[in-house]
Image (cartoon, grey):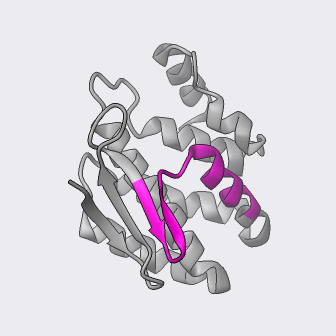
Amino acid sequence: MPILIKTFSDNSVLEFDKGKFDNFCVYLTQPNIPRYAPKDAQYFDRLQQLGKVHSSKKLYQDFLQIYNATNGKIETKVLNLITTISQNYGNDSLEIDKLLTTIYAGMVAEENKAFTKLGKRIKNLGVYQVLIDSLPFNTAANFSKGKKWRELDAIMIEKGI
């Protein structure tokens, strides 16, 4: 049974539903586009492109406001914060709203993963890598695969995230 996260101004819908592992798979349905689960590489690519237009550092600082407000459940105040932040991006505001809300939902999902050691920090690492380290988006999206949590934790500590 889908759980609505947010309906956007263009009537796109973001929701949680059953995935391969749990009930926290994030799905996006947009006008004229069938429902799909956005992949890290997709939104990291767009974040990186939009960071080049609007300043990667600014976009990362805005992301950090959302990151710091994230816990294990979707909260209206954070969804409203994302919309408010997104309004500072002019013609890209709707896309930024969708991207940041998708990442927020992904962080909530990470916080709810069984036996998680890193939780939402794993998304922070990926966003940091594409916006601050300028790693290719596909490299950042696959960076943590096959790595032990302690290795990733050490990398995050080294980067100060």
Left-right relation of 135 to 22: right
The image shows residue 114, relative to residue 111, as above or below, that is above
Q: Position of residue 6 (x, y in %)?
A: 34, 70
Q: Is residue 37 magenta?
A: yes
Q: Nearer the viewer, residue 156 or 10?
A: 10
Q: Position of residue 58 (x, y in %)?
A: 65, 65
Residue at image point 54% right, 75% down: 32
The image shows residue 22, relative to residue 42, as above or below, that is above
Left-right relation of 129 to 32: right
Residue at image point 38% right, 54% down: 105
Q: Position of residue 114 (x, y in %)?
A: 27, 26
For the image shown, how many numbered marks are present on the structure?
0
Q: Nearer the viewer, residue 130 or 30?
A: 30
Residue segment shown in magenta = 27-49
Q: Is residue 38 magenta?
A: yes
The image shows residue 54, relative to residue 99, as above or below, that is below
Q: Position of residue 121 (x, y in %)?
A: 45, 37
Residue at image point 64% right, 45% down: 41
In which quadrant of the rendered view does residue 12 lie? bottom left
| Quarter in which the N terminus is drawn | bottom left
